[in-house]
Amino acid sequence: MSPRGREVVRRKIVAAALDLFGSEGFEQTTVRMIARRCGVTDALLYYYFPSKRHILNAIWEIPQARLLHAVDPNKPLTVEGLMALVDQMVSGSIDMDAILRVMIRQALSGDGAAVAFRQRTMKAWRRDVQAHFATVLPKDEAELNTDLVTSIVFGATFPAMAATGANYPAIARTPEFLEAIRQLVLIGLPFCRDRGEP
Amino acid sequence: MPPQMRTEALERGRDSTRERILAAASQLFSRSGYEATTVKDIARECQLTDPAIYYHFGSKREILTTLLVEPPLKDFVLQSHLTPTREALVDDLCRIFDFWTEHAGILRLVYRHALEGDEDTRAFAEQIARTYETLIMPPLSEIYGANAQRIYGVLGTLLTGIQLDALIAYGDRYGATVATAEFRARLRRLVSGALPPSQAQPEAV
């Protein structure tokens, strides 16, 4: 098989594993289940990944999209711009739904690699968001508002994920869901209140 | 040993075995999840036999529901109940966050199993949410009037986000880390930042 072909199989395995780890949990998922899900034999799977743990580690290597492109980072941030960033964080959580699920379960179980992955991702998101606030706020206020918005979005999306399970993407895409989170940010951030919201 | 003392000693022994089982189960449920943990695993962890476990608990599920006992949050005396000011409320919210530090094991269990859709866990989490509402809405209403409900929504979401973030980031070091001056200052800033100026006060510049 060509290197390209091998890469396709590898991705299929990781995608299947991601799905199963997210719904069944890492412990409960067997290599056989993953193999069956993507229509390969156990033996072929082992050719690509020596163990289940290796597949999990591959998941943490998946590159994550950066946040910045919603809003021009060189223009002063407006409340409208912040709302666009919030929207993008929420859609990020939808795109990463499967990974987030596995990551949170694994991280709470003490899996160091999962924690490291999450810290990397959160650090990147916070840096991006803070850079936007820094266009109009001094450093410590930028930091405070960043901490507030990321905590609020995380605090809103997690219970929704827990309550809706596999339906999360469908629910999270509704205007009501997004509007509810926007409202929390509008009320809870000094940045918004100081600009006359809500 | 007089019969009375013997019975008491036996009861103490029973109680401490129960505690051992609960501690072991809490660890394993958090680490591997409720479904993946077997009674045998729990028995091995506290060096008992399976029958010994069943002597104390009818089932694995019973162990979980015993662990999910609400800590005495209801008995909390809030400063802001007596003096409903924004400052007192900030203090109270930070104290409530602290309170949970002692019961971090339960927190971890609840968040862990929330994602698995466990019914008992969900019911338990809802129970706690109701206790919070009972505690915090009165001073919040005093201070913010009609806006109290919406602000409560912000606080609940914010504190969940901070707590879960810390549980994930710090793992076993959660207790030690949230007790540091640095974390407490951050928590205070966040809670204070999220609370608008009170109705009675002029808008902050």
Image: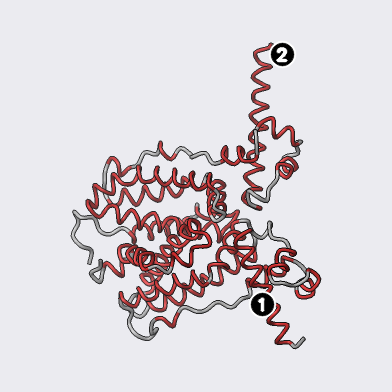
The percent position of residue A119, horizontal first and vertical second, equals: 55, 68
- Residue at mark 1: A11
User: Which residue appears at 31% of the width and 46% of the height?
Assistant: B137
Q: CA distance from mark 1 to mark 2?
A: 70 Å
Give the residue at x 74% y 36%: B50
Where residue A69 sits, quadrant-wise, is bottom left
Which residue matches tag 2?
Answer: B1
Residue B24 quadrant: top right
For image coordinates 53% across by 55% down, the residue present is B177
Q: Amino acid at mark 1?
A: Arg
Identify which amino acid the numbered label 2 is placed on. Met
| Residues marked 1 and 2 touching at CB (< 8 Å) | no
Residue A133, horizontal then vertical, whole percent: 37, 76
Above or below, B11 against A5 in this view is above
A58 lies above or below B177: below
Count up the numbered dots: 2
Q: Nearer the viewer, mark 1 or mark 2?
A: 1
- Quick one: B155 or A35, which is closer to the camera? A35
